[in-house]
Image (tube, grey):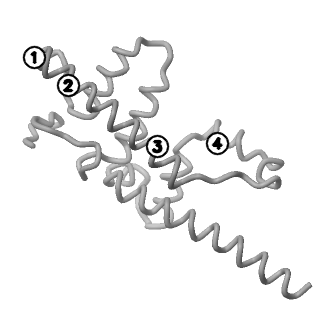
């Protein structure tokens, strides 16, 4: 792959380190935007990932690239749903976790990562997506362990 400023020429895979957490967030916004057509969403996603208009690519190649991009993004979403699955507890629901999530969206995630690593949140958006996914997975598994451990200790001393 060759970069000319923000333009990435060549093959870009959403699984490579050139795909950032910021790209992932932006693709999420693009693909959930129901105000534009599906093709418009794919075009915007293409520009986000590659840095230039898909209309600069010959039509046959463009169709292949757009389909690959959509397929890879769907795989990323499926992987996230599998790895980061967490059912809120009754206490979390009562406290309004779903409303909080709707209000702040992904900013709370990269804000927390920035705080954990002593970085500016904008820097976290530039991290490779695979790194952020790994960190989020590790954090979730640690949280689940701590919840189980607390229950075991509480049961032991009741």
Q: Are marks 4 and 1 in contact (CB under 8 Å)?
A: no
Check disc 1 and report its element: helix, strand or loop: loop
Q: Which part of the image, by quadrant, shows the C terminus?
A: bottom right
Q: Dot 4: within a 10 Å radius of its alpha carbon, few (fewer than 14), some, or many (20 or more) residues?
A: few
Mark earlier in primary sequence (2, 3): 2
Q: Residue at x 72, y 47 (%)?
A: 97
Looking at this view, is 36 or 82 the one in front?
Answer: 82
As measured in the structure, the alpha-carbon distance from the residue carrying label 4 to the one carrying label 1 is: 41 Å
Q: Dot 2: within a 10 Å radius of its alpha carbon, few (fewer than 14), some, or many (20 or more) residues?
A: few
Q: In front: mark 2 or mark 1?
A: 2
Mark 2, residue position: 64
As measured in the structure, the alpha-carbon distance from the residue carrying label 3 to the one carrying label 1 is: 30 Å
Q: Dot 1: within a 10 Å radius of its alpha carbon, few (fewer than 14), some, or many (20 or more) residues?
A: few
The image shows residue 28 at horizontal and vertical percentages of 45, 34
Task: State which quadrant residue 154 falls in.
Answer: bottom right
As measured in the structure, the alpha-carbon distance from the residue carrying label 4 to the one carrying label 2 is: 35 Å
> Is 142 left, or right, of 4 in this rendering?
right
Mark 4, residue position: 101
Mark earlier in primary sequence (4, 2): 2
As measured in the structure, the alpha-carbon distance from the residue carrying label 2 to the one carrying label 3 is: 21 Å
Mark 3, residue position: 78
């Amino acid at each position: 792959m060759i970069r000319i400023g923000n333009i990435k020429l060549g093959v870009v895979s959403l699984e490579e380190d050139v795909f950032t957490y910021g790209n992932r967030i932006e693709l999420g916004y693009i693909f959930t935007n129901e105000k534009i057509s599906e093709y418009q969403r794919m075009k915007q996603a293409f520009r986000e990932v590659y840095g230039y208009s898909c209309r600069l690519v010959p039509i046959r190649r463009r169709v292949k690239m757009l389909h690959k991009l959509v397929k890879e993004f769907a795989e990323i979403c499926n992987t996230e749903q599998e790895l980061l699955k967490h059912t809120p507890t009754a206490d979390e629901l009562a406290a309004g976790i779903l409303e909080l999530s709707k209000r702040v969206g992904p900013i709370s995630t990269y804000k927390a990562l920035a705080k954990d690593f002593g970085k500016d949140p904008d820097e976290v958006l530039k991290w490779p997506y695979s790194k952020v996914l790994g960190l989020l997975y590790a954090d979730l598994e640690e949280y689940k362990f701590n919840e189980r451990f607390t229950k075991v200790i509480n049961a032991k001393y009741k």
